[in-house]
Amino acid sequence: MVFITPTNTSVLEFEGLHLYHTNRSNCSARVRLLMEEKELPWTSHHIDLGKKENISEEYFGINPKGVVPALVDDGTVVTESNDILLYLEDKFPDPGFRDVTAGRQAEIDRWLKLSGDLHLPAIKTYQYYKINAALLPKTDEEQALYDKLQTDPDLTAFHAKHSHGRSFTEEDANTAIGLLNETFAEIEEAIADGGWMVGDAYTLADISWSPTYTTLLAGSFDFGPYPNVRDWYERILQRPQFQTAVIEWRKKATYAAGSDPTIPGNAKTA
């Protein structure tokens, strides 16, 4: 679990749960979803990525990777969205979302790890190729500040692919699609077992992966080969907590109005 000693010491004075997040981020959405499912009160600190509000010494002082989300709980800073899920599940166990037999606990942990491992090479790469690189260009000044603040080599290499007029390639996208298809084929099989990703219980695995479906749907990812996955998502889409934590926040995105197929009324969800 990733705990941060912030250089932005203002957050050490925070009381209760505070979430730094952005509206369309699947990583942010999974944390919002778990907090809604647990009915936890929290304070929103929305980071507008379109305005590059994450590229600042202030925010890098909270999350040294400059990404969202970051959770501050009574001054304790936790980053990495799936680690935040585990942190919240441990601190606020009722209602619980690891309600499976002891032998299947490792399956939940594996799905969370896979979600994190695939975020940069597959999920984020696909979305940047399809949507984000065009929507979120950096000026030379913004790029210079980002390069100064960012110390994570993987994120530096990723963002270098769409800086100074460069862009993600079709080869990048095809590699990402291949990884995603492998994973959704596995989820398709897992869901056939009991309707959820780990048996017959709605768990942290479903909470982690369902906002990813929403994100990939916005980039027109082809879920046609995965009927079980589409049915699973439709059931989750009916949950009021999902509507509040994921869909309603997506509606607030200034660059989503009328163009986001994940928002009801704009297009079908599958």
Image (cartoon, helix red, strand yellow):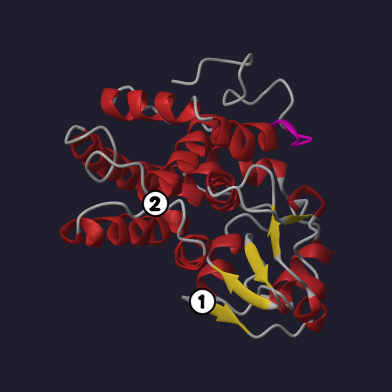
Say what secondary structure mark 1 lies in: strand
Q: Residue at x 37, y 58 (%)?
A: 112
Query: As rendered, which of 214 and 108 lies closer to the eye?
Result: 108
- Decide: is 214 above or below 127: above
Quadrant in the rendering for residue 190 = top left
- Determine whether 262 is above or below 90 in the image: above
Q: CA distance from mark 1 to mark 2?
A: 20 Å
Majority SS type along the magenta span: loop
| Camera sees residue 225 | no
* Residue identified by numbered label 2: 97
Q: Which mark is residue 148?
A: none
**Residue 2 numbered tag:** 1
- Indicate the position of residue 75 as horizontal and vertical percent values: 71, 78
The three-letter amino acid code for the residue at tag 1 is Val
The amino acid pointed to by label 2 is: Phe
Q: Which residues are magenta?
A: 251-255
Where 48 falls versus 251 (above or below)? below
- Dividing the image into 4 quarters, which one contains the C terminus? top left
Let me know if residue 34 is in the magenta part: no
- Secondary structure beneath dot 2 equals loop
